[in-house]
Image (tube, rainbow, N blue to C red):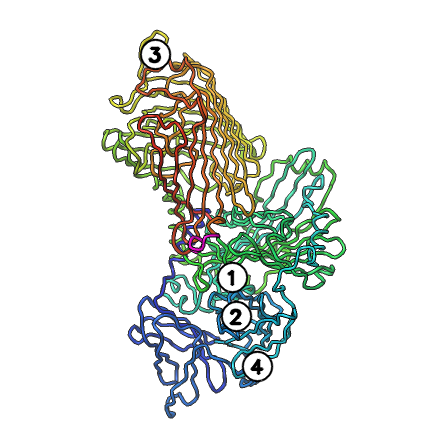
Amino acid sequence: MSNKLLFLFAFLFSLSYNAQIKITGVIINQDTQRPIEGAKISFPEAPEISTLSNNIGYFSLESKNNFDSIVVQIVNYKKKSFPVNKKQNLNLIIKFSEKDKIGTSSIPPSITNQTKIDTDSISPSSNQQVNYVRVSGQLLDEDTEKPIPDADIFLKNTQVYATTDSDGNFELQSNKFIDTLQIITDKYPTKYIPLQRGDNLGLIVNLKLKNKNSSQSTDKGTVSKEKEIDEVVVTGFPKKRLPKKENPAYRILRELWKRRRTNGLTNFKNYQYKEYEKIEFDLNNVDSAFISKKIFKKLNISAKDIDTLDISGKTYIPVFLNESLSDIVGQNTPSKREKSFLRGNKASGIPNNDIVANTVKNLYKDVNIYDNVLNFFNKGFTSPVATIGFSVYDYLLADTVSVDGVDCYYIKYRPRRENELTFKGDLYITKDTYAVKQVTLQSTSGINVNFVKDIYMELNYDNVNDSIFIPLRNYTVLDMSLITKKEGGKGMFAKRTITYNDYKFDEPQGTVEKLLDQQWEPISEGAYNRKDDFWADNRPDRLNEDDKKAYEMVDKVSKTRLFRNIVDAVQILSSGYVNVGNAIDIGNLYQTLGYNDVEGTRIRLGARTFFSPNDMWRVEGYTAYGFKDDQFKYGFEGRLMLNKYNRFTIGAGTKRDITQLGTSLTENEGIMTRSFASSSIISRGSNEYLSSVNQTNAFLSIEPWKNVQLRLDGTYQYIKSANPFKFNIGYYNKKGDIKNDLYDSHLTFSIQARPGAKYSRFGLDRYEHTTLSPTLILKYIKGFNGVLDGDFNYDKIQFLYNHPILWGPIGKSNVTFEFGKSFNKLPLSLLGIIPGNQSYGIINNTFALLDYYDFVTDIYTALHVEHHFNGRIFSYIPLLKKLQLREVAIFRGVWGDISEGSKNMNASNIRYVAPNKDIYYEYGFGIENIGFGNLRIFRVDFNWRGNYLHMPDVNKFGVKFGMQFTF
C-alpha cells in the first residue's frame, strides 16, 4: 500500500475520535409528521458540545465523556431535557407537538427508541414535499426472537442496500423516495415492506423460517406486533445445497467454460480505443455532528455538502476528484507494444495529484472475469465463473432478463464459507453465446483485507464473437478505513469509473506502427488545462448533478489554508522530505539517526534539488557525523536525463562513508544507496566488521524497450577496515606481502527487466506501483589491474530473479533466486559474502540466523521463499480466526563454495567457511496482521537453523520483527 495514500487516510481519519457516548435520531413535529430542521441538541453539562438537526430532522451527537441527558432547543418551542443511556442511543425519535410551543400548556414531548411505526397513521398530504426515505431497525427470528445477521436489506429496484450486523441491526437511506423495503436472507422467505416518505426508524421486523416441506412459504412476518405486512415471496437459495449436476446453473456455467472467452485486445493484430476514467475520494459516514466540528468550519465544509451513495446509503463528502481521457494504441504482432497518450486531465483537490490518482489506480487491478483467480490488493479472489466455482460458491438460477437488449440468464451467487477471499453478487450470461454480459462482485462482511471494509464492482462487456470479449465499463467502489471496520466508523470511499469506447481493430499495420514509432509526448500539451467545452464534447456521459456538486465542494475545500497544510504534512510524512521554496528538499528525515559499533550514534543530514515531480535533472547529497569515531562522512551525486522517451540518463557521484559490505548478494550500483546494516538502531550482538569506503562512480543508462533497462557503471573505490583493531581485511599480494587496504577499478554492465511493471510520471525518479511483475537482473562486472591504481583483474557474473505469485484461495508466494560467480581469486572485500542479518528487523533476501561474514564464497546459489496464507489456516481455529491473524511459511537456502586461490590469499581475521557440503537452510513461520481494529501493521517471524550447527557461537533460533503497511 502506498505510504502517501496511507498518510492521507491517517490525516482524514484523525479528524474523528472514538466517542464514549453516541446519540443519533430525528426530531419531528408530532402533529404534521414533518421533520424539524435547525433544532439544537446539546449536553446540559457541556453546552459547547452541540449539533443542529438537518433538513430531514436527523442529528448525531457524541462525546468522549459520559452524560445522562440531552437538551433540545427549538425556536418558539420550550426547551426540553431527555434522559439517555451512557453508551449508545441510536435511532431515537423525538417528537414535539403544537402544545410544546411557548405560551401553551406544557405536555412533555415524547422520545422513543426502536419505535414501531404505524404506516397507516401518516396522511399522504402531510408528506407531499418529503422526497427522501431513511430506514433503520432490527431483524429478528419470529420464533426465537434472536437477531438475524448477514441479511441483505434493499430499497426495492435500486442498488441501495445494507447488510444486518451481528445484532440484526440495519440502516440505509436515499435522497429519492422508494416506497418498498426488500429483505433477502438464506433461511427465510423474501419480505417486502411498504415505507412512508421520510423517516422509518426503529423498525422491528420479524421473519419466520420457511416451511421445510416447500421451497416457498406464506409466512407473514410483521413490522410490529400490532400490524402485519403483506408480502410477495420469491424462491431464494435452497436450504439444502443441490448436487452440482442437479443445479440448473451448472449447465449454463459448463457451457460458459467450454466457450471461455479471451480479451479481444490480445486477439487482434492491432487495436485502438479511447479510455475515460473518473476517480473520486470521499470521506464517508459523516453526519451533522461530525461536520459541526471546528476543523470543518476551517475547511469551509457544512452539512449541506453531505451526499449519499446509492449502493450503500452511506453519507459522504468528496475530497478529491480526477478525470482523465486517453488514447490507447497497441499491437500484438509482430511484437507486442502499447502506448498511452493523455489527452486531458481535470483534477480538483490535491496539488501534484497524479501520484494520488495513480495510487488509487493501483488499488484496482485489471480484472478479467474469466480468470480463475482475480487480483485485488495482490490477493487472489476466486472468480464467480472459475472452473472451481462450485467448490467455492453456491449458485441460483433466478430468472431470464434482458440486458442492453440481450437476453441473459440471471444467476445469483454467494460464497459457501466465510473468511475466504470470495464475492457475492449477480451474473448475467447471454442465452445464445453463453458469455458474461454483466457481473457484480461484492465482498462478504468478513473480508480479511486490511483497511478495506467493502468492495463493490460492476463489469460490463460486449462480445465480439463466440470467443472474444471486450470491456465496456468498470465501476468500482472501495469502502476503506484506517482504524475500524465497524459499520458506523469513519472511512473513505475510493471510487473509480472507467469507460472504453471507439474501438478499432486490425487497422492497416503501417498506420499503427507509424503511431507506435512516433516519439510521443506521454502527455498532450495543455492536457491539464482543458476547457469545459472539451470535457463536454469528449466525456462518454454527461456529469450528473452529484458530480458537479463534488467539483464545487472539492474546489472550495482545496482553497483553504488548513487543507493546504494537511497536504503538505502528508507529503512530508510519506516522502521523508521537506520542500523549501519549491526548489530544495531537505531529508531523508527517516535516515537522520542511526547507530553502529564503530561510529556510535550517527547523525545524517541530506538535501536534493526538487523543482517538480518530473525533473529531468537532480543533484543530491548528504553529510553524516559519528560521535564515537569523531569523523564526518559525505556523499554527492548528480543525474541528468537527456531523452525522456528512451530514458537515456547519465550521472556521477562520490562518497566517503562507513559501510557494511556483504549485505546483499546482488550488488547495488550508485552512490546514494543506503546500507541498513551500518545504521541500525537496535542489533543482535556486536558488529565490528564495518569497512571505510571512498567511492567514485559514473554511469549511463537507457531503456530501449519498455521496462527493460541497460546500464553501464564505472566505479573506482578505496576500501579499508573502519575498525582495524577488531577487524582487518588483510590479504597477500603477488609479492607475498600483507596489505590491509585495496584499490578497485571496475566496470559493471547490467540488464534489468520488469515485464508488466507500471509507473507514473516520466522524470528521473518515476513512481512505481505495486504489481505482481517479476524482476530479472543480470550483471557482468569486470575489474582492471593497473587502471586508476586498481589492484585486481577479475570477472564476475550475478543474476537475480524475483516473482510474487498468486495461488488463488491458498495465498501468495514471493520467490527470489540468486546466482553468482567470481572467476578469479579475490580478497575478502570483493568476494560473495552470504548476507546475514544481525538486526532484530526483517530484511528481505538475508539470512536471519547468520552473522556477517559467517559464510564467504566466490560461487553461490540462493533461494528465498515466503508463502502468505492470508489467514486461511488460522480461520479454522476459532480464537485465531477472531483475531484475524495471518500465517507465513518461510524457507531460505544457499549453497556456495570458495576456491583454494581465494583461501590462500586470505590474511584477514575472518576464517573462510563456505556452505559447500550441504545446502545451508533456515525455516520458520511468521505471524502477520498483528494489531488492533483495522490497523494491523506488525509482523513477527520465528526462525530455526536447519544445519551447520557445529559452528562457533551458532544461532539456532531467532525472532525478527517488522512493520508492513499492506492490505
744 and 246: which is toward the camera: 246
The residue pinned by badge 1 equals: 550
Nearer-the-camera pick, 137 or 178: 137
Residue 785 image-quadrant placement = top left
Of badges 2 and 3, nearer the viewer stands: 3
Indicate the amino acid at tag 2. Gln
Most distant residue in the top direction: 735
Residue found at x 34% / y 23%: 694
Q: In this view, which residue lies farthest toward the front?
A: 213
- Tell me, for residue 173, which label it has, or none: 2
Q: Residue at x 34, y 38 (%)?
A: 840
Pointer 3 residue: 732
- In the rendered image, the vertical position of residue 857 relative to residue 284, given as above or below: above
Residue holding disc 4? 228
Above or below residue 712? Residue 570 is below
Point out residue 544 in the picture as x, y percentages from the top left corner: 59, 63
Which numbered disc flags the more N-terminal residue, 3 or 1? 1
Q: Which badge, 2 or 3, comes first in the chain's sequence?
A: 2
Measure how far apart labels 2 and 1 are at the Cα level: 19 Å
Predominant secondary structure in magenta?
helix
Q: Which residues are magenta?
A: 876-882
Please state which of the two labelled residues, at mark 4 or mark 3, is closer to the viewer.
4
Q: Amino acid at mark 4?
A: Glu
Q: What's the amino acid at mark 3?
A: Tyr
Within the magenta stretch, is there residue 783? Answer: no
Q: Earlier in the sequence, mark 1 or mark 4?
A: 4
Give percent across and percent down for residue 605: 31, 37
Q: Earlier in the sequence, mark 2 or mark 1?
A: 2
